[in-house]
Image (tube, rainbow, N blue to C red):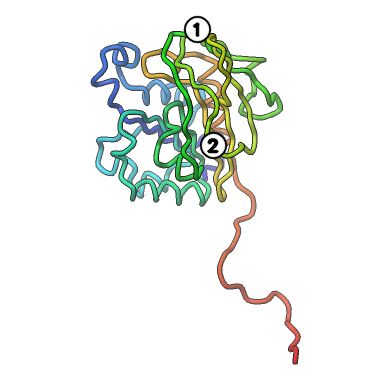
Amino acid sequence: MSGGAELRVTVWNEFRHERTNPAAAAVYPEGIHEAIAGPLRTLYGHEVRTATLDEPEHGLTDDVLERTDVLIWWGHLAHDEVNDTIVEKVQARVLSGMGLIVLHSGHYSKIFKKLMGTSCALKWREADETERLWVVDPSHPIAAGIGEYIELEREEMYGEHFDVPPPDDLVFVSWFEGGEVFRSGCVYRRGAGRVFYFRPGHETYPTYFHPGVQRVIANAVRWCGASRGAAPTYGNAKPLSPIRARG
């Protein structure tokens, strides 16, 4: 774990929509991963690399994972193409202390479902509707500097019920113009790792250029990458004190 202000961040993205969908390419010509990575580098001073699905080992080699404090994950079209061995390696890193931020349609990713143990299903609609992400835990570090809510002029709707375990902390709840609500900022602790699910980020909307969304992601990087407490030990343990013989 990086000890100073700078954290080692890997932004993972399928990078399929931006190469096949003209609307997505127009919004994110360099890919969603670069739109997310840019502010983390230039505004927040982190050491940021990117990785994409079609790279060898999806860009998530053992060396990359070992040198990652926080992994950010965006996926949609090709969840099933992610190699199960890579998923197991990411899970192991999270359990041992790596932070994980799962964005938007990453709720259906193999790694998020594996860590949640549920279907992670929800309802959805694409209708260019307004979304307000209300801060429901203003004391949480992920909400720092946000104010009462973030308003996005156009976004895809996600609606309840969201089939995930009750979050350890709920930071945001979304309201949509069509009437639905959704738990949009969910915090979990898995092993020694911290996980944050953040809902907005449809591929044809400029959501990741919104300053409030960028601030939430940066806050989540800092929170998910924070130093951990004492390292636990597992397995067979020798007694700390003598154990009396009992007849």
Instruction: Quickly name the residue at label 1.
Output: 153
In depth, the one of 219 and 195 nearer the eye is 195
Q: Nearer the viewer, residue 40 or 3?
A: 40
Q: Nearer the viewer, residue 144 or 244?
A: 244
CA separation, marks 1 and 2? 27 Å
Q: With 9 as the anchor, is 190 left or right in this view?
A: right
Q: Position of residue 154 (x, y in %)?
A: 46, 9
Residue type, numbered disc 1: Glu
Residue 164 - label: 2
Q: Residues within 10 Å of mark 2 (few under 14, many from 20)?
A: some
> Which residue extends farthest bottom?
247
In contact (CB < 8 Å): disc 1 and disc 2: no
Q: Quadrant of residue 170?
A: top right
Q: Residue at x 42, y 48 (%)?
A: 66
Per the rendering, the mark at residue 216 is none
x and y, in percent, of residue 227 in the image: 59, 44
